[in-house]
Image (tube, rainbow, N blue to C red):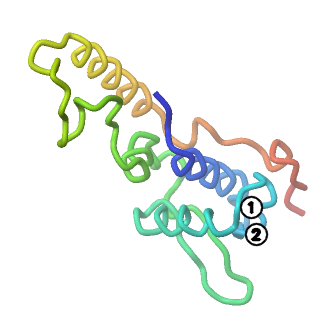
Amino acid sequence: MRLTNFSDYALRVLMLAAARADRLITIEETAAVYGISRAHLMKVVNQLTRAGFLKAVRGRSGGLTLARAPGQINLGDVLRATEPDFALVECFTADNHCMLTPRCRLRGVLHEALSAFIVTVERYTLADLVLSPEDFGLQPAA
C-alpha cells in the first residue's frame, strides 16, 4: 500500500504548523523546508483548510496555523480527507471487472490488512508527531 503524495504533503504541512505553533507558517516557507512545489502545496493547504485542520489568515502578514490543537487532529481523519480512496486493488473499486472476484480470497486478506492500517493510524493524533522547529532545519522562536 502506498499513500498519495497529497496525503504525505498534508501530514508534513500539519507537522510543520504544529512545530511552529508560536507563529503562522507560509506556503513559501513550507515549500522551501520540504523542497515541494508551491503550486502543489496550495492545493494541499486548501484541502486542509476546507477540512478544518488548518486556518488561513489573510493579509500581508498572513499565513497558516492549526485550526485545532494537535491532540484533536486524528491522523485517520486527515487521511480520509486527503486520500481519494483506499482501493488497494481493482476489486475494491466500483468498476471492478476481475473475473476472480466471486471466488477470490485475496480481497478478504487485503481488506483485513487495510482495516488494520486504518485502526492503527486512528490511534494517533498530530500531537504524537510534533517535532521542534530545529528538526526542520529552522531557527527556534525568538
The residue lying at 19 percent from left, 35 percent from top is 96
Place of residue 117 in the rendered image (x, y in percent of width and height, measured from the top left): 40, 25
Would you name the residue on which mark 1 appears?
Answer: 31
- Is residue 73 left or right of 23 when viewed as pictured? left
Q: Amino acid at mark 2?
A: Glu
Q: Is residue 129 above or below residue 80?
A: above
Q: Residues within 10 Å of mark 2 (few under 14, many from 20)?
A: some
**What's the mark number on residue 28?**
2
Q: Is residue 69 above or below residue 129?
A: below
- Is residue 43 left or right of 16 when viewed as pictured? left
The residue lying at 64 percent from left, 48 percent from top is 12
Task: State the residue in front, 14 or 83.
Answer: 83
- Is residue 28 left or right of 124 when viewed as pictured? right
* SS type, badge 2: helix
Task: State the residue in front, 82 or 77.
Answer: 82
**What's the mark number on residue 137?**
none
- Is residue 7 left or right of 131 when viewed as pictured? left
If the image is split into quadrants, where does the C terminus sit?
bottom right
Circles 1 and 2: CB distance less than 8 Å? yes
Quadrant of res 27: bottom right
Place of residue 88 in the rendered image (x, y in percent of width and height, measured from the top left): 35, 30
Place of residue 118 in the rendered image (x, y in percent of width and height, measured from the top left): 37, 30
Q: Is residue 60 above or below residue 77?
A: below
Place of residue 69 in the rendered image (x, y in percent of width and height, measured from the top left): 52, 54
Q: Residues within 10 Å of mark 1 (few under 14, many from 20)?
A: some
* SS type, badge 1: helix
The residue lying at 42 percent from left, 30 percent from top is 123
Q: Amino acid at mark 1?
A: Ala
